[in-house]
Amino acid sequence: MRVAIFGTGYVGLVTGTCLAEVGHDVVCVDVDQTKVEGLEQGIVPIYEPGLESMVKANHAAGRLAFTTDATPAIDHGQVVFIAVGTPPDEDGSADLQYVLAVARTIGRHLTHPTVVVNKSTVPVGTADQVRAAIAQELAARGVEIAFDVVSNPEFLKEGDAVADCMRPDRIVIGASNPEAVALLRRLYAPFNRNRDRVVEMDVRSAELTKYAANAMLATKISFMNEIANIAERVGADIEQVRQGIGSDPRIGWHFIYPGVGYGGSCFPKDVQALARIAAGHGLQPQLLNAVEAVNAAQKGHLYTLIQRHYDCGEDEGVRGKTFAMWGLAFKPNTDDMREAPSRRVLEQLWEGGAKVRVYDPEAMNEARRIFGEREDLVFCQSATEALEGADALVVVTEWKQFRSPDFARMRKALGDAVVFDGRNLYDPAEVEAAGLAYYGIGRGRSLHE
Ligand code: NAD
């Protein structure tokens, strides 16, 4: 099938590439000329395992093209996807300006009956706004062309996006017209061979499903972080508690890891946006507000442990200290630093007067772009190099390569011989046996008085 996709970010690029991989003819449109020119030359602007080779292969095979020109792309598409960003507005609600700009562009250039598929995460009722924007442009042109607007939210996980897209656990299609559903079923048939993954529903339910999924996952994380903080105070070990509760199948093992809080482009903005939707309909979203508040506090928790260790008061910092920081991305296998907990920890360390030596396997360029050159930030080539001349280690992202360090060597490298483990990667006893002080999240021993 012939497909056009607006927005060539994490979602649009991965979706377009995977659709091309199964034989569809895909044209990706983006307003970012540098990005488009790079992609045409095989330069993939994000790190996502497996993506670059697929982009190159499908581009070379002529099934995947990139352009800034909307007109031929809309003309090309039997199906036109909207996969542009929906960042938070000032009040936390989703900013729809990019989605509606694409809708107007589609209305201005539509030449044949088309199914418009919204993949961006959007508030309930957005499909109606998209439909109205397209209709308005068609009316201004004085033409009548049939079109449908379908909601098809995306559930891919950054860091695993290609696998998620090639083997989705569900394909949610929110539509009112059976013909549009049939078209999307044909489009997704190659991903749907061994069992039917399509979940059909009405448009509004599909729009809400995406927010509900992310809010549920964020809730699990904030819940565990709150229990971890209780564990810390009462002298319990959250890792033992996690084993104890995860074995209950009603609770399960997934997403019950305590840490430095959730980040990324989705959870923070989607929880806030859902809370705004609720408030807009006269509901007090108490749980959603609490999930966000717990997360905001948790992002500062590692620094509280650091202050506690160095015996600094509320306003006193860690002036003159140097910290090694392992991990910058909001999670492993991505270079995405949007809302990453590392950013808060860095800011707090800098405010406290410390210098930071950072290493991340993939997010170094992104960090350079965000922070630029500054005296209190040193970019290192490896995890080991980050330790050189540092007083303490802070672990913020759970990359596999950080899991089994040589603690004896670490002990020699770190001036103050202390590890702040924001992801509970290490066994406290093993770290301490090497002569290092250890702080984890919710591991009782650090804060118990
Ligand atoms: P992104 O910021 O990585 O990419 C958005 C792209 O859209 C950018 O390249 C931008 O230049 C482009 N764009 C903006 N206006 C445009 C226009 N008028 N025409 C063409 N291109 C335009 O965003 P993303 O992370 O891919 O997210 C896109 C949407 O998908 C959001 O609503 C997000 O919430 C949702 N989502 C994201 C993820 C994720 O893991 N990143 C997962 C599921 C859903």
Image (tube, rainbow, N blue to C red):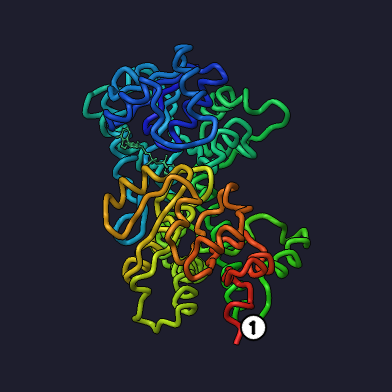
Q: x and y percent of residue 448 in the render?
A: 61, 83
Residue 145: give x, y in percent of width and height.
35, 22
- Give ligand 1's quarter of the image: top left
Viewer-proximal residue among 106 and 98: 98
- Would you name the residue on which mark 1 appears? 234
Quadrant for the C terminus, please.
Answer: bottom right
- Which residue is pictured at 55% across the width and 37% down the height? 173
259 vs 197, left or right, is: left
Quadrant of res 171: top right
Disc 1 residue type (three-letter):
Val
Residue nearest the viewer, comparing 19 with 196: 19
Q: Residue furthest bottom?
A: 449
| Residue at the left extreme of this rendering | 140
Figure check: 398 above or below 366:
below
Q: Is residue 209 above or below residue 77?
A: below
Res 121 → quadrant: top left
Q: Residue at x 46, y 75 (%)?
A: 304
Q: How many marks overall?
A: 1
Residue at screen point 46% across, 42% down: 362
- Where residue 43 appears, as percent x and y from the top left, is 39, 26
Q: Residue 285: in sight, yes or no?
A: no
Up the image or down, 233 lies above or below 371; here it is below
Q: Secondary structure at mark 1?
A: helix
